[in-house]
Amino acid sequence: MSVLRSSFIRDVVWQRLRHNRMALVGAFIVLVMFVMAAAASLSNLDPAAINISQSLLPPSATHPLGTDDLGRSVLVRMLYGARISLLVGFVAVGISTLIGIVCGSLAGYYGGWIDALIMRFVDIMLCFPTFFLILAVIAFLDPSIWNIMIVIGLTSWMGVARLTRAEFLSLRQRDFVLAAQALGASDARLIFRHILPNAMSPVLVSATLGVAGAILTESALSFLGIGVQPPTPSWGNMLITGKQTLGSAWWLSVFPGLAILITVLGYNLLGEGIRDALDPRLKE
Amino acid sequence: MTLLEVKNLRKSFRVNASLGRPAARLVAVDDVSFYLNRGEILGLVGESGCGKSTTGKLIIQLQKADSGQVFFAGEELTHLSPRQLRTHRKRVQMIFQDPFSSLNPRMTVGAILSEPFVIHKLAPAREINDRVIELLEQVGLSPEHAQRYPHEFSGGQRQRVGIARALAVEPDLIIADEPVSALDLSVQAQVINLLKRIQQERGLSYLFIAHDLAVIEHVSDRIAVMYLGKIVELTSAAELYKNPRHPYTEALMNAVPTPDPDHPRPAALTGEIPSPINPPSGCYFHPRCPYADQLCRQQAPPLSELGQDHLVACHHHSKVGKYLLHKRPI
């Protein structure tokens, strides 16, 4: 093995994550969600199979989580909902994290008018009440799942940009960055080898928490009827379907609601576990 | 032969009040000039905040000077573009004060030490490994240390890694910015000895920055004493110890402790270092100086030649020495 191998992730972070019980719970929840999404994709169950004669049945052996007003299996619909939530969470956060890192890095590394321009734009974006901005934009576009992901991504990158910029500002003046600069390292090398890897832990944590936020936003949009459109199932639009029959058929909204709660909790636990594991000063 | 010459170097920082209104200028380095010969060690000493680290960063072009010039081996550095500068980088290197922030915590020591070879394409990829091991051995570490991360090392070991990194590009000049002041006393001597050994083996020049004379005494050929951004005395180490001509140098010498109970206690300089944002009138040192009189309050003394290679900036340099605690050689 070469002495030049340089993988902090492989050596330290994974070890630490494995010893953090709460992070493991979070990782398990996230994993379960992936399995649910995969099960939906692999199975040939139809989430839109209507069977009026079996409508509003409580949980039973044939329908473990009951059926809805059209006789569709809540379990099958939730599996497909997991797929939507996962997709929205990752794509939206991917977009926002990418934009945030690029903007924050440029602002923090180069400073001066580039910094002023980018950060004032961030301030402007933060002035909009994000949720209503999304509502307004979705009202103009058609409420497809892709539009929702893009709009959530484009309206949630400011926090990441600020975090990244703050990390860059402080790391830019650290001795190890100055040392690399004195060695003749290029801007790209300074940014990608020295500053960015050390700036990633708060960004990674914020991205993990951001997945939870994006899932919540999608659920809320779907709940209001301008998110994922029926008959495509999402946890949010299942909640609203269940709302009318909450008194008589609690399983329609309780299970999707619990799924949202547990998923958000899982991502939060995982995010905090990652934060602790990535801290190089922390010794076990 | 002159390796480095610094002429009238000046650097000030803007101090902002609320809402980014410029409030004042802090002059960190004020008209500093000196030279450094090849193979020589120049000590730069002064209290915290007197601009010695800034001087180092101006020379190595980590900060841009407001005015003044830096000649390295005859070439002026302050006007080079970042691209031109990059090729010059490997001739001057820096060792940092804090060994806990001078190494990238996400890179192994091997990766840190191989970077100079990669940046300047100093060795083909398959040889880099051997070169890294060679460097580690030169600074008293062993090859297996290459696979470890900085947080697994002690302060002294980390400082050795920092020295190895500076040596990788085979520089002509190393700026050592208080390289031992963060280390334990016992480790200080080891690191100083390492620095001296390397200097002798390679014929390097050092600009050795320190905040007291105790450390610098044993390493320097010549010593420059800095106070509030200005050089107040500059002469050979032997001359400075025998014949200090600036009251501030005198005070620094009195502050060096000696391991002898019969000796006069080290005397700390009274008074705070004045704010460089709002420096005193006349000679910057007059509020703390036992020799100060009316002239000192009104007129700043120029740095003038006293004798053979002895520069001093004091109106009353002939009187200085009255308060010097005479110490027996140990």
Image (spheres, rainbow, N blue to C red):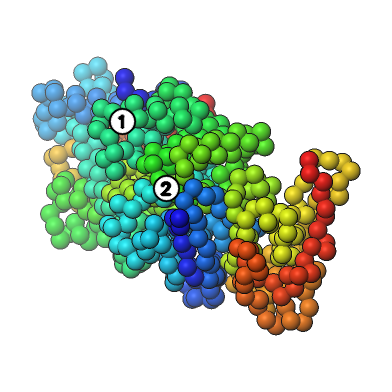
Residue at 62 percent across and 63 percent down: it is B308
Q: Earlier in the sequence, mark 2 or mark 1?
A: 1
**What is the CA distance from the residue labelled 2 to the residue labelled 1?**
21 Å
Tell me the quarter of the picture where residue A123 sits.
Answer: bottom left
Does residue B32 lie above or below B101 as drawn?
below
Does residue B60 lie above or below B164 as drawn?
below
Location of residue B177 in the rendering, given as x and y in whole percent from the top left corner? 54, 50
Crowding near pointer 1: few (<14 within 10 Å), some, many (20+)?
many
Position of A88 with respect to B248 (left or right) is left
Tell me the quarter of the picture where residue B24 sits.
Answer: bottom right
From the image, tell me which residue sits under label 2: B172
Residue at 89 percent across and 43 percent down: it is B262
Location of residue A280 in the rendering, given as x and y in whole percent from the top left corner? 46, 35
From the image, tell me which residue sits under label 1: B128
Disc 2 residue type (three-letter): Asp
- The secondary element bearing badge 1 is classed as helix
Whether residue A105 is visible to the viewer of this picture, yes or no, is no
Location of residue B175 in the rendering, given as x and y in whole percent from the top left corner? 49, 50
Quarter of the picture containing the C terminus of chain B is: top right
Question: Foreground residue, B16 or B227?
Answer: B227
Question: Foreground residue, B147 or A162?
Answer: B147
Question: Foreground residue, B281 or A157?
Answer: B281
Does residue B197 lie above or below A103 as drawn?
above
Location of residue A142 in the rendering, given as x and y in whole percent from the top left corner? 12, 54
Residue at 29 percent across and 43 percent down: it is B120
Does residue A245 lie above or below A4 as drawn?
below
Disc 1 residue type (three-letter): Ile
